[in-house]
Amino acid sequence: MNFNIECEEETDGRWIAEVPQLPGVMCYGATADEAMSKTEVLVLRALAEQREPS
């Protein structure tokens, strides 16, 4: 399963990364790499929660 991470710099200098295929999966970081790394972790958490039985 592949997801696209979109990343852009905000006007205040922070970076935001998000995964359009997973609404709500977005993270801020001081650098683009940091924002993307945090987002990758959040993607894994979101997918794990979807697989857990209720």
Image (cartoon, rainbow, N blue to C red):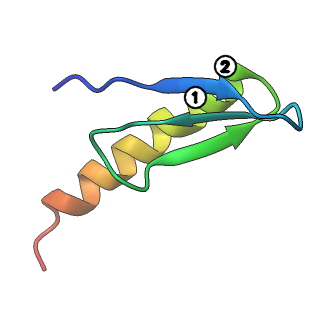
Residue 37's label in the rendered image is: 1
Say which residue appears at 67% left-offset and 19% top-offset: 33
Q: Are marks 1 and 2 in contact (CB under 8 Å)?
A: yes
Quarter of the rendering containing residue 13: top right
Image side of residue 48 versus residue 30, left or right: left
Q: Is residue 45 above or below residue 49?
A: above
Image side of residue 50 versus residue 31, left or right: left
Q: Residues within 10 Å of mark 2 (few under 14, many from 20)?
A: few
Q: Position of residue 1 (x, y in %)?
A: 15, 26
Q: Position of residue 22 (x, y in %)?
A: 30, 47
Q: Position of residue 8 (x, y in %)?
A: 64, 25
Say which residue appears at 89% left-offset and 38% top-offset: 12
Say which residue appears at 35% left-offset and 42% top-offset: 44
Q: Is residue 30 above or below residue 46?
A: above
Say which element carries label 1.
Answer: helix
Q: 38 or 22, which lies in front?
A: 22
**Amino acid type of the residue that numbered disc 1 sits on in the rendered structure:** Ser
Residue that mark 2 sits on: 33
Q: Residues within 10 Å of mark 1 (few under 14, many from 20)?
A: some
Say which residue appears at 19% left-offset and 60% top-offset: 50
Quarter of the rendering containing residue 46: bottom left
